[in-house]
Image (tube, helix red, strand yellow):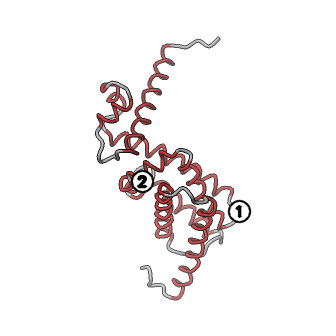
Amino acid sequence: MKIETSGSRRQDNKTKNKNAILNAARRVFATIGFEACSTREIIRESGLAQGTFYNYYKDKESVMQDIADELAEGIRKGIREARAKAETPLAFLSDAYFAVFHVMMQERIHLDLLTRNRDIIRGYLFQGGSMTYILEELDSDLERMVGQGGFPAHPIRITSVMMVAAGFEAMVLLAKEDNYDLRKLSDYLGLLFQGGIHNVSKVIQEDRELLK
């Protein structure tokens, strides 16, 4: 027989309350938008008392940060697994995109959240926070692939930023149109950047001042 202690009940209640706030915020951010909504709307949607909300978060910004962190961790995990299994340079690129799309498509609210709050999410990607790790890890993985001969030498930072930006805009597209084959879209992006990396490398060999 399981004996539930007061400590475990309190922890369960804390987890339940925090999840209620996060789920409510996702719905509010996805429908109204982060900029347009107030903390009161999140509290009302959660069904919790105002004091309970402030036991966990000080404002809507801190809630959005937690949502972005959680989403970033799922994306990073999917990318790491995909790249670890990739047997070709093309798979390294396309399978990572497919993993990201798979994570985002698991719950429609993820895409709606991103579309409604494009500038906010883009800021998390390129201006600090846990989402920036997606970009930093891509830098490291591309450097490793160049070192192993999978890709020729090229401006890695620029490539990473463009790859992340393309994936971001592809997800916005998926939110508006649901008739895309995710595998084909992933392969298209993989081929686009694989060809681009090789072509840029050739051009730089001919004109080393091009990207300085």
Q: Where is residue 41 in the image (x, y as percent from the top left)?
A: 31, 35
The residue that label 1 is drawn on is 87
Residue 105 x %, y %: 55, 49
- Give the mark toward the camera: 2 or 1: 2
Task: Choose top left, top right, bottom left or bottom right for residue 26.
Answer: top left
Q: Work out whether residue 197 or residue 169 is closer to the camera in this orientation and state it.
A: 169
Q: Is residue 142 above or below residue 207?
A: above
Q: Label 1 amino acid?
A: Glu
Coordinates of residue 57 in the picture (x, y in percent): 34, 34
Q: Where is residue 88 in the image (x, y as percent from the top left)?
A: 69, 66
What is the distance, in whole Å, between disc 2 and disc 1 at their CAs? 33 Å
Q: Name the residue under label 2.
A: 115
Residue 87 shown left or right of residue 5 in the figure: right
* Residue located farthest toward the bottom when viewing the structure as drawn: 206
Between 171 and 190, the residue placed more toward the observer is 171
- The quadrant of the image that shows the N terminus is top right
Q: Which of marks 2 and 1 is nearer the N terminus?
A: 1
